[in-house]
Amino acid sequence: MKITSKLWIGIAILTVLSPIGLMLPEHFRAGSAWGEWGVEEMERLAGYIPQGLEKLAGLWIAPIPDYAFKGCAPLFIAIVGVGITALVAVGIGKLLVKKGD
């Protein structure tokens, strides 16, 4: 089996497994997934807002909050996102690698 085939299989496995980390805390009513906290939830968890987080909280606004568009299933959005990411990665790879290398 070629190394690129193994790479794509690994990426497919990680793509299938990664949503589990977001779904399990919700399923067990454990709050947000680790690291997915906003300022309010961080204050609730830690009792305060770290100075750096408070300063940088408004720096990045998610282009697709909650990973969904109105009326679209989050799974559909996730599949589209993975597809776009894979296409961009393949495109960059083709630009960087010359024929015959």
Image: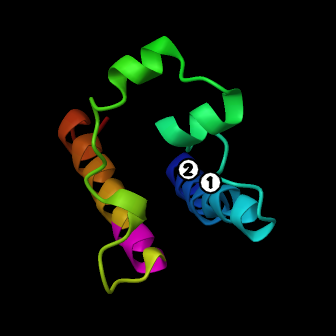
Q: Which residues are magenta?
A: 75-80
> Is residue 77 inside the magenta stretch?
yes
Structural crowding at the residue carrying mark 2, measured as other residues with C-alpha within 10 Å and reported as few (<14), some (14–19) or many (≥20):
few
Image location (x, y in percent) of residue 57:
36, 29
Name the image quarter holding residue 41: top right
Marks 1/2: CA–CA distance: 5 Å
Is 41 on the left-hand or right-hand side of 45?
left
Query: Is label 2 in a helix, a strand or a loop?
Result: helix
| Position of the C terminus by quadrant | top left
Q: Main secondary structure of the magenta part?
A: helix
Mark 1: few, some, or many residues within 10 Å (few <14, many ≥20)? few
Question: For this rendering, which residue is in front, 63 or 80?
Answer: 63
- Amino acid type at mark 1: Gly
The residue singled out by tag 2 in the image is: 7
**x 74%, y 59%: residue:** 25
Residue lying at the far bottom of the rendered structure: 71
* Residue 21: quarter of image: bottom right
Q: Which residue is at a point 34% across and 71% down the rendered structure image?
A: 80
Residue lying at the far right in this picture: please name it.
Answer: 28
Residue displayed at 25% across by 53% down: 63
Mark seen at residue 80: none
Q: Which residue is denoted by mark 1 in the rendering?
A: 10
Name the spot of residue 9 as percent of width and height, x first: 60, 60
Q: Amino acid at mark 2?
A: Leu
- Measured as percent of width and height from the top left, residue 38 is found at 49, 41
Which type of secondary structure does the marked residue at label 1 adopt?
A: helix
Q: Are marks 1 and 2 in contact (CB under 8 Å)?
A: yes
User: Could you tell me if residue 59 is visible in this image?
Assistant: yes
